[in-house]
Every structure is written in structure tokens, then in C-alpha cells.
Image: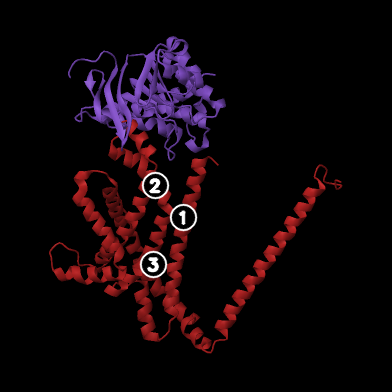
Chain colours: A red, B purple
Amino acid sequence: MTEAGTPGVSARQLERDAYRRRRARTRAAVAVVSTVVVLGVLTAGVLLSPGWPRVRETYFNLGEARSVFPEVAKAFVLNIRLFLVAEVFILIVAIIVAIIRVVPSPALAPIKLLAVVYTDVFRGTPTILVVFLVGFGVPALGLAGLPTSLFWLGVIALTLSYGAYVAEVLRAGILSIHPTQWASGRALGLSYGKTLRLVVLPQAVRRVAPPLLNDFVSLQKDTALLSIIGLVEALRVAQVDSGRTFHFSSYIVAALFFIAATIPLARFTDYLTVRSLRRENGI
Amino acid sequence: MAEAAAGLLRAEAVRKSFGDHEVLKGVSLDIAEGEVVCLIGASGSGKSTLLRCLNLLEQVDDGDIWFDDREITDPRVDADAVRRDIGIVFQAYNLFPHLSVEQNIVLGPVRSRGESRADARARAHTLLERVGLGDRAGAYPDALSGGQQQRVALVRAIAMQPRLLLLDEITSALDPMLVGDVLDVIRDLRADGMTIVMATHEMTFAREVSDRIVFMADGRIEESGPPEQIFTAPRSPRTAEFLARHLP
């Protein structure tokens, strides 16, 4: 029993196709309806709340937002600079710490212990505390040669804190590379160091690129923590503005800047992942 | 023991354990220049471990290994330098997945031997051409079939211009259809006079290609001799029993 127009397709297959189409339609309808209901209830809840008119006035005042925008934008440049500089130092510290922890040389035992203590301490300490301690503690030492500029103190604090996280991500990546890759490198007469650098690290970094960039998205946001030691970055400017005008729209503006800055990084992660998949699988 | 070794490589009473398990229980082996030796024996008899000991990927527990009249089991010997002269190809290919075929092949000669990139690349292309993969230099390993990957792995080892080539069951992971291409490469190498020690389960091929067969059982060399003698008139009952089960 073959239908006219589709020779070769059995009635049973046509029936299966029709069922799949019906099922897909039903599922799509359920998804649309539930989304609309949830969003509707949330919106109604907010809009009908007794305080909404006040909230709208203080948080979503367009005129206020527009007037504070240039100031926040200018201050956000500092966030970006902090991020870019700290990122470089974090990577350097993290690679060194990760390698020290991975290398199986017994001669390195004391340094290994130091690396373990470093990661334990700085992963365990809230970043805001590290910022406090470095920002106010280091200048208080009064030692010559130590930086006193807030910018560099901020970079040091973020590097200490994030270096520990990123080192652990990299270490996990290095350990995830199969021992046969080490053997192949060494079998070509490459030294331990060269095998690590040319064979293992490139694969490890590729493998942990998504969690690594996730940490960097987080770092971008945590540059705002440096406002507490007096760096005039975007959050600080928003705070000052809000203190002057009793409006909170400036916070929303600052939040939008942070969101806008992290999205390209997220897309870049996706792009890198897809590219290496495509290249290595020859798709 | 400072006497000179006879051939290219000599292993003397080599022992190796992993934990409580003694894998090599005193293995002695002589390899002459230009000789092709096949190691046969059941899985777990110590063939792979012996090969890995010969190029110092595993450290021996006792016994010594001489290469080119030099005792390479001496801890003062530069193991990297020894491995430049003793190539090895593994069962699982182990190509570097982040590098293209050409980069895989060029890495050793350039970064380990210190050759110029141009020379290394030229030789890589000649060798790829020879194994029928001249058009795949830019491909990445995961885009190749198992047989192609194993031929690239062979080229990667040969490109180092080793004086001795160790092959560790390099056809065991391959589809039977793809084994032939890889074996052709080995025939070619033999014709060029390459010294080869290979662990294999391809009995017919071992008989055809080797100058000598070494049968291993239980971490020892049970019997060794020319292929005709081993396959037609084995002296040890264990050899006879193994061959009875593995010959077609």
C-alpha cells in the first residue's frame, strides 16, 4: 500500500513520519505555552507589586541612566585594563604552579609543598579578603620596591587569588593527557621539558579552554571588587553617582557594561571549541 | 662488565617487575646490524615490556643493555640521546592529535635532533609519498583511518633516522583489511637494511620477513632460531603448543 507521489516509501514509514510530526508539534506547543505562562506570571508579579512604581523610578530611570552613562563608560576602561593585565600575570603564575605540582621530581619536594600551600590558601580565601589584605597590608609594610599604586596592588590581589584557581584547572588538564602521549614524546628523544611544552601542554590547554575562559569571565566581574581599596572603576563611579542622586539606575548601567564585556568572551570560547573540534576531526 | 658487545644491541639478563608482578625474568638477546627479529608469544609474556626496556622507556630492575658497545642502562647515559637512535612505534599509534601529519613527523627531527625545518619537511614528504600518504600531510590524525595513522606513526619514527626500530604489535589494533598496507611498509624497511625488532601476532608475516624468531613465555625467552626451524621443528614443547594454537 504505497501512497501516490512517494513511490518506494511504505505506508508504515509514512505513518511513523506523521506520528513524529504530530509529536514534535505537541512538544513545541507545550514549550511555548509554559514559557509564556512563567514569564507572564513573573512580569505581572513585579509590575503589580506595591513598590514597582518606586523601583521603576529609582532603578530604571532612563534620563538618569543616560546622564551617568559616559562617566561609567570612562571608568569601565579601567576594569578592562585591570582585567587584561591581571590575566597575563595569572596565566604565568598558574602555568608555573601547575607545572611544579605535576613534575614528578623528588628534588622539587620543598617547592611542591609551597605550591600546594599556595593553592590551598588562596582558593580558600574569599577574593574580597585578599583584595583587602594586599590593598592595605602591602603598603603598610613600608618596604622599598613594593608597588604602592592602587592599580598594581589590585593586579597583585587578583593574580594571587585567580592564579590558584587557574593553576588547578591547568593541572587537571595536564593530568588528563594520556600517558602514551608522554611516552611518544620521550620516544622521539624529546626531553621531559620539551615533551611537556610541545606535546602535553598544547593539548591540555585546548582541553581546559572552556573552564579556563569561564574563570576569566569571572575575573572580569571581580575587577569590581577593587573598588573597595579605592580604585575608581565602573562600580565605584556608579556608587558615587547613586550617593549623589539617590538613584540606582547607575548600577544598572554598570551591570550592563559587565554583561556586554563578558558576552564576546563567551562567544570566543564557543568559537575556539568548535574550531579545534572541526580541525582535529577533519569535519 | 666492560667487554664489547658483538652486535648492534645486546641485552643481558634483563629483569623488570611492576609491583609484585615480575614481567621479565632475566632476558638475554643479541641483535646484529641489519637483522629483523620477531618476538612472538602470548599476551603478557613480556614482549612489550622488553621493547620498552630496550629504548629506556622503562627502567630495568637488573641486567644490562648494550647499544653500539655502550652500556645504556648506566644512569649517567643521556637517555634522550639513546632514544634518538632507537625508534619505537606503539600498538595504539599515539600520534599527537593537536598536530597535523607533517607536524607530527617533523617534531622529532627538528626539536630533538636539531635539524633544519626545511630538511625535515622534505624528508617527511618523501617518506609520506613512499607509504602512499603523500596527499595527507596537512590532515590531522583523527581524520585518518587506523591504517593511515599507523603508517604515519611509522614515518614519524623513521624520520628520526634511527639505527634500530622497535615495533610493538603495530598491526594488532587494525582492521584486517588495513594490515596489509602497514606490513608493506615493514617489507620496504627491511629491503633498505633497517634493523628491526618487532613484537607481533602475525605469524605468517613473521615467518616471511624475519631472520630470527624469538618465542617468549612467562617473562623468559623459551626458544629462538631461524623462522623455518621454529615453525617446522620447534625444540620446546611450549613453542609447539603456542604455534599449534596460532598458526592458521
Q: Do the residues indicated by labels 2 and 1 lie within the same chain of the protein?
A: yes
Q: CA distance from mark 3 to mark 1?
A: 17 Å
| Residue A167 left/right relative to B174 | left
The residue under label 2 is A176
Q: Nearer the viewer, residue A281 or A263?
A: A281
The numbered dot on residue A221 is 3
Q: Is residue B173 left or right of residue B50?
A: right
Element under disc 1: helix
Q: Are marks 2 and 3 on the same chain?
A: yes
- In the foreground, A170 or A254: A170
Indicate the position of residue A262 as horizontal and vertical percent values: 44, 63
Task: State if disc 1 and disc 3 touch (CB < 8 Å).
Answer: no
Query: Compared with residue A168, is residue A261 higher up or lower down, i.e. above or below?
Result: below
Within-10-Å neighbours for mark 2: few <14, some 14–19, many 20+:
some
Amino acid identity at mark 1: Phe
- What is the C-alpha distance between the residues marked 2 and 3? 29 Å
x, y (%) of residue B120? 37, 27
Quick one: SS at disc 3?
helix
Chain letter of disc 3 in the image: A
The first of marks 2 and 3 along the sequence is: 2
**Up-down: is A273 above or below A81?**
above
Q: Secondary structure at mark 2?
A: helix
Residue linked to disc 1: A268
In the rendered structure, the answer to whether residue B166 lies left or right of residue A43 reads: left
- Answer with the quarter of the image where residue B229 lies: top left
Which is closer to the viewer, label 2 or label 3? 2
Judge if badges 3 and 1 mark residues of a common chain.
Answer: yes
Q: Chain of mark 2?
A: A
| First in sequence: mark 2 vs mark 1 | 2
Q: Residues within 10 Å of mark 1 (few under 14, many from 20)?
A: some
Dots 2 and 1: beta carbons under 8 Å? no
